Amino acid sequence: MTYLLAVVAAALSMLMTAGMAGTFFGFSAGVMPGLNAASAPSAVDAMNAVNARIQNPVFLAAFVLAPVAAAGAGALLLTTPRSGAAWPFFAAAGVYAVGVILITAAVNVPMNDALAAAAAHGGPAEAAARIWSDYSARWTTWNTWRAVSGAVSLLLTGYGVYRWGRGA
């Protein structure tokens, strides 16, 4: 039963982490360049709409539970003869917690809140251009770090599965 639970936890962690890393990658590689090509008022409006809608149960569950599942897989593996496969899962949870959750909470969400507050005050197109210019590059840089951290976390879970399969 422990192995089955560990398999489920590992699979869920990999799926959720891949989804999050892909989401962040998609934003850095496609969405933000697309918004940068639009007018600043349109980009601000679109980003604020995305930020409001992305806070939904499916996204939030995957976002928060990915490292929990990785740590769970690691904890379950510690109770088996293949406990050497546990450490990559713990490392994956740590990388994700710092590189995805912490960056999101410390940088991206406050920037999103500031963008929404600035847009609520309205203003001429020149103000929107300044706001978007200040926001876009910095937000994308930190978002790219989230994508990289998610990818590293995913690779670590994959390495954990590899070690597990090799009998580590």
Image (spheres, rainbow, N blue to C red):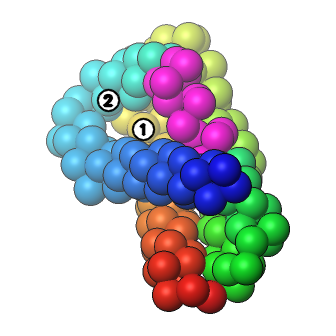
The C terminus lies in which quarter of the figure? bottom right
Q: Are marks 1 and 2 in contact (CB under 8 Å)?
A: yes
Q: Nearer the viewer, residue 86 or 58?
A: 86
Tag 2's secondary structure?
helix
Residue visible at 20% across and 33% down in the picture: 38
Residue 43, label in figure: 2
Q: Nearer the viewer, residue 52 or 160?
A: 160
Q: Is residue 61 left or right of residue 90?
A: left
Tag 1's secondary structure?
helix
**Sooner in the amino-acid sequence: mark 1 or mark 2:** 2
Q: CA distance from mark 1 to mark 2?
A: 7 Å
Residue 76, label in figure: none
Q: Is residue 59 left or right of residue 77?
A: left
Magenta residue check for 62: yes
Q: Is residue 3 left or right of residue 128?
A: right
Residue visible at 58% across and 40% down in the picture: 63
Q: Is residue 122 above or below residue 59?
A: above
Whether residue 145 is visible:
no
The spot of residue 135 in percent (x, y) is 49, 44
The spot of residue 107 in percent (x, y) is 67, 49
Which residues lie in the magenta part?
54-67
Tag count: 2
Magenta residue check for 3: no
The residue labelled by disc 1 is 132
Q: Nearer the viewer, residue 53 or 32?
A: 53
Q: Is residue 50 above or below residue 97?
A: above
Q: Amino acid at mark 1?
A: Trp
Quarter where residue 96 is shown: bottom right
Q: Amino acid at mark 2?
A: Ala
The spot of residue 31 in percent (x, y) is 27, 42
